[in-house]
Amino acid sequence: MIRRPVKVFGAFGALALAAVAVPAGVSFAGTENAPAAASRPATTQADSLLGGEPRVPAELNPPAGNVVHAVLKAKGVQVYGCTAGAWTLIEPAASLTGVTLRPARKVTALHYRGPSWQSDQDGSLVEGDGASAVRAPSAHPDSIPQLRITAKSTRGDGVFGEVTYIQRLDTVGGVAPAGACSGSATKAVPYRAVYRFFVAKS
């Protein structure tokens, strides 16, 4: 993964963000007091570094009073298992890299069954209520849907300690294998996505 240092001027402080290596594909667009947009407009969120409008369906926006706290890009797999002759999602398994906004700092995390996201830096965790997730189609063909997930529980006082909502955006890949299956077969299907984590506005 290529990481580029970012030099921006805005509410978060030029020096703080310039020191953070932001992974390609992380978009700050749509955040309050976001840094200035890049000179070349992004064609998709995957092309966006700091600029361009994120393609977020209206139904995936959290209620008023919640603001973006962290933006992370995920790369991993969706693991499917055979149940009664059909492929059924078992769990995601992905690594995430991105930044928090206040303060601006690089963060990394793991995404796994729950759905849960856990910082591998401070141990904080957020578990989402997957059963009540709001869905919207991906802009990319043959890809898992975009989501808005409500936080069900949190742990710790780190990056995920106060998360209220999670968005899964710009999904690529990850759909269940085609056709029937048999026995106890499992398959891991590669996917990518951008996750935005919200907290209650203070």
Image: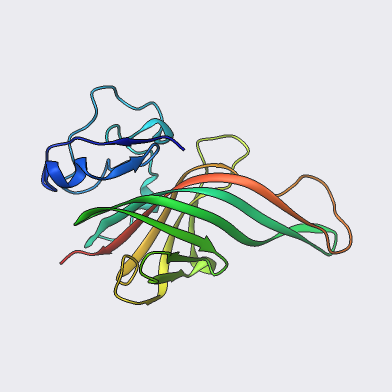
> Which residue appears farthest toward the top when viewing the image?
40
Instruction: Decide if residue 81 is on the left or right side of residue 126.
Output: right
Q: Position of residue 67 (x, y in %)?
A: 24, 57
Colour mode? rainbow
Q: Position of residue 25 (x, y in %)?
A: 40, 38
Please give the name of the residue rendered at 89% of the width and 63% of the height, measured from the top-left corner.
183
Q: Is residue 111 above or below residue 49?
A: below
Q: Position of residue 46 (x, y in %)?
A: 43, 35
Closer to the camera in the image, 156 or 183: 156
Please give the name of the residue rendered at 54% of the width and 68% of the height, measured from the top-left corner.
131
Q: Position of residue 51 (x, y in %)?
A: 27, 33
Closer to the camera in the image, 56 or 187: 187
Quarter of the image for residue 85 reads: bottom right
Closer to the camera in the image, 123 or 58: 123
Please give the name of the residue rendered at 38% of the width and 43% of the height, measured from the top-left corner.
56
Instruction: Decide if residue 114 is on the left or right side of residue 63.
Output: right
Q: Is residue 4 above or below residue 155?
A: above
Using the rendered image of the protein, determine whether residue 5 is visible from the camera's viewpoint.
Answer: yes
Image quadrant for the C terminus?
bottom left
